[in-house]
Structures are given as structure tokens and as C-alpha cells.
Image (cartoon, coloured by chain):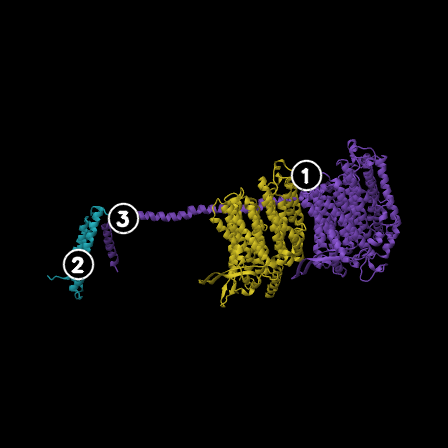
Amino acid sequence: MNESLLINFAVVILFLPLLGFIVTLLLGKKVSKIFIFENLVMLIGLILSIVLLIAKVTTFNNVSISSEFMWIDMGDVPVIGQIQIFLGLLLDDISALMIFVVFLISFLVHFFSIDYMKGDIRYNRYFAYLGLFTFSMAGIVLTHNLLMMYIFWELVGVSSYLLIGFWFEKKSASDAGKKAFIVNRIGDLGFLLGLLTLFLTYNTFSFVEIFTEISQGNLPLNSEFGLTITGIFIFCGAVGKSAQFPLHVWLPDAMEGPTPVSALIHAATMVAAGVYLVVRIFGILTADAMLIIATIGALSALIPATIALTQNDIKRVLAYSTVSQLGYMIMALGVGAYKFAFFHLITHAFFKACMFLGSGSVIHAMHHEQDIQNMGGLRKKMPITYATFLISAIAISGIPLTSGFLSKDGILAGTYAFGTLTGHWYFPFIGFLVAMMTAFYMFRLIILTFHGEPRNKEKYEHAHESSFIMVMPLVVLSILSFFIWYTPNPMDPEAGWMYSDWIKNPELHTPENLRFGFMQSDVTSVITPPGEHRIMYSETYTAALHHVHGSAVFLSIAMAVLGILLAFVMYQWKKISADILADKLKPLYKFSYNKWYFDELYHKIFVAGTIGLSRLIAWFDLKVIDGIVDGSAAVTKAFSKSIGWFDDNVIDGLVNLTASVSAFIGLIFSKFQTGKVQTYIIMVIFSLVILLFLFKSF
Amino acid sequence: MNFPILTFLTFIPVVGMIVILFLKKENIKGIKYTALIATGIQVILAVFLMGNYNYSLGGINDASSFQFVELFRWIEIHDFPWIGTIKIDYFMGVDGLSTPLVLLTAIITFIATLSSWTIDKQLKGYFALFLLLDTGMMGVFVSLDFFLFFVFWEIMLLPMYFLIGIWGGPRREYAAIKFFLYTLFGSIFILLVMIGLYFSTTEVLADGSKVFTFNILEMMNTANYTSDGILSPLNPNNWRFLAYIGLFAGFAIKIPMFPFHTWLPDAHVEAPTPISVILAGVLLKMGIYGILRFNYPIFPEITQQLAWYIGLFGMINIIYGALAAMAQRDFKKLIAYSSISHMGYCLLGMAALNTMGISGAILQMFNHGTITAMLFLIVGVLYDRTHTRNLDDFGGMATQMPIYTGFVTVAFFAAIGLPGLSGFISEIFVFLGAFSYDTIRIIAIISTLGILLGAGYMLWTLQRVYLGTLKEKWAGLKDLDRREYLMFIPLTLIIIFLGIYPSAMLDVMNTSVNTMVKFMQDSQMFFSSFGG
Amino acid sequence: MEVTLTHFLIVSTILFCLGIYGIVTRKNAVMVLMGIELILNASNINFVAFSRFGNFGLQGQLIALFVIVLAAAEAAVALAIVLNVYKTFVNVNVDEIDSLRD
């Protein structure tokens, strides 16, 4: 197997879902079984991506394979210079891994949906949309340039719009789709500006070329600030897509979509795209930009976690938990814990998809009941769902032996080390606090849903374990939540192949003076081949990481156990009444329950503001501008009327006066005209006589 | 000269018109098919033109690199008192600037003809005027003599007036007169500047004598100006500046640019669907085309001076149009305002004065032509069935008319600028171009808000009309019929094709745009050496 | 008493005045015609008289002859007109033939 074959594989993988989309969409009405084709396409895609991953990891480790073609060639143009826009694919370690994750979860969701969506009137179209989504997501993962990233970024937005609003008869669903698209677009504006800045400076969108330029010292807009601001602009895209604070409001609403969609898009893949984007541009982030990213990440980890504590909708709890976990990843990237962030992206994708599909299984069994107040005791009725859900919850809480522990512990250690090195202690503080909250609300969810007595007898009676088609994906995903897939040592992720072979430290291109002190390469302990700009964590960083590792492990486990215990005390053993506690902390409880009033705030300020402004503009247009136009018409009309009056009376009056005067004179003179020659002759003679007298004097 | 393809392109509709005038009023089929055949031949000719177009020739200011040129003396009067010889040429030719628009005109007119099938009032007069309008539009895009251009420009005005005034909605007289007066108002400026330029430019004839000329290519050469001509760059006064403003205003009314835009919503709302399609698809492009063809190369130094203002008005158009669209309740009015917003991108791209910006502007003209034509057809289809355009009356159309809604989704997302559809390419080119020009960078940044607002009102409309539960009174609506398919499918294919392979159009205009940018740069040097 | 130019002129003046009187006062067109004849003859006398007393040779007499011929012709034409007027209006009263007025 050689490189060109591998890249052809990637091309096929990219376009298979598009084929599935087109065929399924066009034949959906005529062929009722066409969804099988879509599933088959996804299966082939999954197999190919596994082959790709294995080939990449075993044979082409460390190699970046890219292939491109010229999309737009405008040649050498005046003013700007060379304009050639290339599109192409890039296969490196992270894209190979990511494409596998995307196809695995996508296939499982396709499979799960066969039963879950059964009986829907637009059954085939649902699968077509899933195909479109997978295509767009694959494009994001495999692209080798920012423009194509942006293109697929938007396409992902649209497929998400279509899928969230899939049951568009419901107003809440179409509202949620619209909200998701527009909020995402806000972030995309920033992304676009970053794109423009980079193209302005380098006339290319290609990651590799931009990175090369920057490592040679050509900064965007020729300033250090330019590099920082570009990083932040592009990060804006990630804020939108990964539902980071302050644009996190769309994700909970997006739960209006079918549950498998939530699992695919709003837990595992699309929202991860933002993190993936930051991972991609990690090499050019400056210290300032990273600090901002870390802060946004920390806020996004904290705020949704506090909201998730009090929510009662099973999917909303999971949604807020997703935002919170994504905040973890972003924060990890911000503090330089690159490997842990990407690792968490993968582990989280599996266990969160598992939880969403599990919640789908529950909702399906409960006949579209989503309120956990009405559940309870489902453990007996749905043992497999319960088991897989539990495994995932343990993983997300960060209990050892699970994948979640490995990645989360890494992130916490990273923030801890960052705190010791830079003095920004609130990152580890928030990190550990959120770890406890995560454990608490996850087990609150489990206890309220699966443990205790059923609170809604009628629905409970009808509940039953889901079919094989729905349970199989749950099992696969929960198995992937164990540590063994990633490392042989359940306590130390660094020991495993995941970190040593698959996820490597990236090359860093930011000028040395713009990096954090611990990322500067002059104090490196690692010998690097010349010409390569590997990330150079300094001696002090490695030491700090080692130093804090023990305490970080201890603290994170303690926090998780504390959270779980608290959940059991409050909801299983009822030693502390949740209601009384809520009553005592009423303002806090209400604040959390109402999601910090973000929706209300945004609605009041931005939505109402925009609509108000648009009304004002429309009024202005109709009354003022059109008023001026119509007014000038009216003035012209009035003016012309007065002119008309003037014309009729004065000018025409003058004319008529002349006429009547001459008529009068004529009347007089006509008396002389008798028609009788003889009179005329007399007149002639008289005149002659008069003339004679007149001229006599001369 | 070979086959005079441009003359045929321009005057085939007139032939069709004459045939229709000889047909009996009752011969509905004959009239309709004559119009369809005339416009169909036009499409074939336009495609043939594209096929034989030489991508390497620039045009703009160089007569020899125009293609399919037809040039002969049209009017020549010797020894005219005071002036001397009056000479007006019949001068037609295309370059990368006009070729896309010629194709656009042919396609849009053909589709508008199909859409005219539902007209049932005074068919004969309708199609006769319609074809005359077609000639005017085509002529505007292919003529290179200012006088000839102006003649076509005015020819197009009259049929439009009647088409809105007779076949329009309830307030048709108001709208028609508003349209007519506005455009005529603009024409006056154009006429004045035309005459001013005429008396400032001379052309050397074959016998060595110098005569005044209407040839716009001669007007672009500073050497051709008489030293005392009123609009001569050698003349140290501000007349050139005023002439630029006047000419710009004349064309800006057609774009329509804020604050000259209010005729557009009224005209659109009152006009019958096919006329709206033509209005949005072709007529609005004439403003931008006029500025690019006349203002830019004839007054390059003032263009440079005023680029910031052009960009500013582009920004105002984008944001103002989008906000105004958001508040509308009439579906057609909403699309009309979105047109204003989208034409703002053209202005912004033009203001960039570089290849990406201007290419983006021209591409945006083409794309807006196809996308908005489709949007108006969409409204038309709905109006034909429900006889209302009030957005609040609809809801849930997607369940009743799924295939139609599919086309709607494509058109709406193309208007939002979704990648993979044509609108995206032109928008991103406009932004790339505007962002590259540091004078208007801030304006470009603010204008990106338009993308957001565009998504806002389009998706809101999509939701109000097509999503949600179906209202009972619309339960009997039928999905598209075969004729409507024929209207939608070509436009959809163009939108998707140009979204995936924009080079098909960009390559056509590339050399010309480069020539223009280079020409403007060189003349900038000329003017600065001259002392500004 | 010698007959001088003045006598001739007096005669012709009387004749002229008679002619004018005839033209102005008579209602019958034929009488008006006769008045015109009188005026013509008055001028004839003048011509001949001036020719005789002035140093003009025979020019005056010659013109007088012409006038006589002209008068004859004029009388013929005028009578024809009068005849036709009579045919149209059934009278020759000049007061009643005033279509010139309209």
C-alpha cells in the first residue's frame, strides 16, 4: 500500500456519504427500502476508514500525506499577485484517527436509527440527511486548507439545521434549527475574518503553507497582534460550533432533533469540530490567544455544569454536560495540554454518544417521555441500556479503569501544571470543581432514571428493553469506554500507544517570543531532527507535569467519588432532601434552573434588538425615504397645479386679453367696412384730402 | 466580420414581436410559442457565444480585443452647423464583463417567458412588449457606443412601464410611474454626461480629420480629449467630478443603491411574476454593469478617489436591505429587499478595485440574477395557488408541496451563501477582495454582518412559510407541474454547478477584469504624474 | 381771352368731380360705370392739355388714345360683369351687392 492509494481511500471515504445522500434523497419517495443503501454506504465507509487508520498508524506513522487540485486559478493578477485556490485532503495522525471516530459513530447512529425512526413519514429523508452530515463532517476532518474547512463547516451547519428541524411541524423544532444555524453563523463570522486575514497575508488557505510562512517569521498583517487576533478570529468559529460560552445557547435547544441525531451531531462529531479546528491551528496560537481560549473553555466548562445540576429533561442534562466537556477540551488546548484535549475528544465522543443513544433507547421505551421526574426504576426493565449508560457515566465522571479517567485526568494535570507554572490557578480550580459537578449530575440522572421506584406507573408498565438493532451500538460504544483500548496501564495514559504513537505533540510555528515560557524551545530536553518545529515543552513543564501528576490523580478521583456519593446521598438514600436544599438555596437554584437566564437575556437584547431595529428601518424606509420621494412628488404636483393655475389665469389671461382687445378694435373698425365700394372710395378721397393737407406744409 | 451574432442576439426578439403583431389576438398558442421560440433562439445563441468566447482577450479599453465586434457608421451628418461632422457608430462587442450578463439575460428571459404562461390578460400586447424589453436589455449589454447604449437603455424603459402598469397588481399605476420617473431621472444625468463626454473627446478618422465621438473606448484614452473640452482631464475644473457623480447616480438608481431604492419594492410587489423575475434578474444588473463599463474606465482617477464611498454605500445596502427585509410581511417585498442587500455585495466588491473584488461583483451579479429569479418564481408559484403573499397566512407548505419545498430550500440557502451553491463563491470573493484593499477593510468587516442577517431573515421566512403545521385552507394545493419544473431545474442546476465549479464563469471574466484593474492602476499613475 | 392750361384743367376737374359724384351716389352699376368713363375722360383732357402746353411732343395725345381704347375694353368687360352680377343677384344695385363685406 502506498501513499497515493491511501489518499484515494480518503477521497472515496469522503464522497461515499455524499453518494448515499444523493441517491437516498432522490429515490427516497419511490424506493422505500433505500435506507439500506445509505446504511451499506456507511458500513463501507467505516471499513475503509478502519483500513485507513491501521495503514496510517502502522505503515505511514509520522507521515503527512496530502493531495490537492487547483479549484480556482486566476493566475497572476495585478495588485494582489498570484491567486490560486487549491482544495485538497490531508492525512496525518489526527485526521486518520478522527475520520475513524466519525465513521464509527455515524455508522452506529445510522444503525440505531433503523429502529428508532421506524414509522416516521420522512424515514428515508432522515437517512439522506445523515449522509449529508457525514459527508460534511468528513470534509472538515480531511481537509488540508482553511477554505475547505469553512465550506464544510457551513455544510455541517446546514445538515445540522435540517436534522434538528427534522420534525419541522413542531414549532420548537424549527425554532431550534434556526437558532442553531444563526448562532453558529455568529461564530462563523469570526472564522471568516480569520480566513480573510490569512489569505490577505499569504494568498493561500493551505495549513502547511500558512504554517511554513509563520514559522519563517511572516506574521499576518505584519504584526504580533495580527497573529494573536487571527488565532482568536478562527477560534470564534470553534466557539460557535462547539457551543462554547457565550454561544452555547443553541446546543440544549438542538435536542429538539431526533435523539440519534443528538448523539451523532451534538455529542460526538459536529460539536467536536470546533475542538478539532483549534487542534489544527494549535501550532500558530500565541500565548495571549491561548489564554483567551483557556478562559472561554473554563467558563464553558463551569456554567453549563452548574445548569446541568438542576435540569429535568434527560437530553438537556446530557446537552449541558456536552458543552461542559467541550469546555474542558478547549480549556486543555488553551493551557497547552494538546494531547489530552484531543484524547478527551475521542473518549468523550464514544461515551457521550453511548449516553445519548442510551437516552434515546429510554425515550423510545417511554414513548417519547423525556422528563426524568416521570421515570425511575427502569433498571429492571432495561438492563442492557442501564449497564451501558452506567459504564459511560463512570467514564465521564473520571473513575479509573475507564477511558474518561485517562483523558480527564490528563486535562486536570495539564491545568494543574499550568497553574503552577503561570500562576493562573483558577483553571485547575474550575477543572476540579467541574469534575465533581459532572459526577454529581450524571449520577443524579442515572439514579432518577433507572433506580428507585417508578414515578409514572403507566409508562413504566409499557417500557421494555429495546431491540438488538438499538442495543448493539450501545454495547459497542460502552466497550470502547474501557481503558484497555488506549493503554495497558489504567493509571497512566502516557504509558499507552495512544499517546506515544497516535496522538503526538504538534509542530509549533508561533515565534518563540509569543509562546508561553514553558513552550519555548531553547530550553528543550528533547532532541529533534533539524528543520522540524516540534512542540518544545521545556524541562520545567515536564517536571511540573510529573510533579503534579500524583496529586492530580488523587484529587480528580476524590472529586469524582465525592460527586457520586453526594448524588447517592441525595437521590438514592434521600439523606438530604433535594427539595429542601433547593428551597434553601432558592435564588441559586432558580438561577441554575433557568440556565442563568441566557436565553432571556439574548432574546431581549439581540433578537428583540435586531427585530426592533429592522422594524425601525422598515418604518424609516416607508415613511422617511419613501416619504421624501412621495413628498417630492406631492410638492411637484402642487407646484405644477399652481403653475397650471398661473398658466390658465395669468398667461392665458394675457393672451386672451390681447385677443379681446383686438376683437374690440376690430369690432370698431368693422363698422367702416361696409362692403360698398362707394363708401371705400369716399374714404379714399377723404384720406387723400387729409394727406394733401398734411403734406402741404412740406 | 462573420456571422453578426450580437445583432441577432439583440434583434431576434424584435422579429418575434413583429410576428406576434401579425398574429390574431385569439391565437394564444401561436403568440406564446413565438415568444418562447424567440427567447429560445436567444439562449442558443448566447450559449454559442460562450462556447466561442476567447478567454485570453481582455476588452475593456482595447477595441481590438473585444470579440464578435460589429462596427459600422450608423449616423453621419457632414457640415452640421457649429459642430462639424456628427458621427454615431453602430458598435457592438463583448468582453469578459458583458459575456456573463448576455448569457444571464438570455436564460432569465427564457425562464420568464415560461413563467408568463399564466398571464391571461391581453396576451398579444404583453408578449410584444416583453420581447421589446428583451431587445433593450440585450442591447444595453452589447453596445460599445454611448449613444447606442443610451438608445437601448431608453428602449427598455417604456415596455417595463406598461408591463407593470397594465399587468400589475392593485397599485400598479403608482408603482409603474414611480419606476418610470426614477429611471428617467437617472437617464437625464446619463444623457448630460454623455453629451459632455461627446464634446470633450475626439476620434481620428481614416482621412486624418478629427471628429467628436460617442465611442466609449475612445473616451477611455486620455490622449483623445480636447484640451478645452468640458470633461477633459486636462481641464482644471471640477466638472469631471460632477460628471462622475451624475453618471454614478444615474446608474445607482438602477442598482438600486440606498437612498434611491424605494422604487424597487413597489415595482416588485406590483409587477407580475415574470416581470419581477426580469427586473431582479437582469435590470438591476444594468446599474452595476454601467458603473463598471463607464464610470470605472472613463473616470479612473475619480473612481480611486471615491472607492471608499462606493464601499460605504455597499455596506449600507447590505445591512439596510437585510434589516428592512426582516421586517416585511409581504413575501415579495421581502425578496425585493433581500435583492437590495445582495446588490450591496456587488458595490462592495467593485469598491475593492482589485481582481478578486470585481470578479466577485460580476459573479455576484450573475448569481444574484439566477438565485433571485428563482426566489421570485417561488413566490409566484405560491401566489398562483393561494392568491396571497402575506407571510403570516402560510405555514407547513413543506408537507403539502415537498418537491417545491426542496427547490425552495436550495434557493434560500443559495441566497444565504451556503458553500456548494453559487452565492457563496461570489460573497467570499467580494469579501476577499474588499478585505485586501486596506481603504475599505473596516467596511468589509462590518459588512460581514450581512451574512448573519441574511441567514436570519431567510430562515425565519423558511420557517414561517414552509415549516410548522399546515393550515387547513391550503390542504388542496398541488405540487409543481411540468412547466414549473422546466423553470426551476435549469436555475437549480446553474446554482449548484457554479457553486462547485465557479471557474466556468470566473475564467470568462478573468482576463477582462485583470485588464480593467491594470488599466485603472496605470491611469492612476498617469493622473498622479499629471499633478492630480 | 386766351384759352390757357388753367381752363382745360378746370373743365377736367369738373368732369372728374362729376365722375366721382356719379360713382359715389348712383346705385345702379351701369351709372357707376358711366362715372368711371367720365373720370377717364377727365384724365384724357389733362393729358392732351399738358401735351399741348408742355414741351412733350405728341406723347400726351398718344396716351389719351390708349386710354380711350382701354376705356372701350374696360366698358366691355365691366358691362359683362354687370350682366353676370345681374344674373346672380337679379339686380344691379351696388348697395345690395356687399358680399365683399363677409
Q: Tell whether label 3 touches label 1 (CB within 8 Å).
A: no
Residue A169: assigned label: 1
Q: Amino acid at mark 2?
A: Ile
Q: Amino acid at mark 1?
A: Glu
- Say what secondary structure mark 3 lies in: helix
Q: Nearer the viewer, residue B489 or A242?
A: B489
- Pointer 2 residue: C68
> Whole-percent x and y of residue B46?
57, 55
Distance of label 2 from label 1 (alpha carbons):
123 Å
Same-subunit check for callouts 3 and 2 = yes
- Indicate the quadrant where residue A481 lies: top right
Same-subunit check for callouts 1 and 3 = no
Q: Which chain is cyan?
A: C
- Say what secondary structure mark 1 lies in: loop
Q: Tell whether label 2 touches label 3 (CB within 8 Å).
A: no
Viewer-nearest of labels 1 and 3? 1
Distance of label 1 from label 3 (alpha carbons):
96 Å
Look at the image and give the colour of chain A: purple
> Whole-percent x and y of residue B72?
50, 61
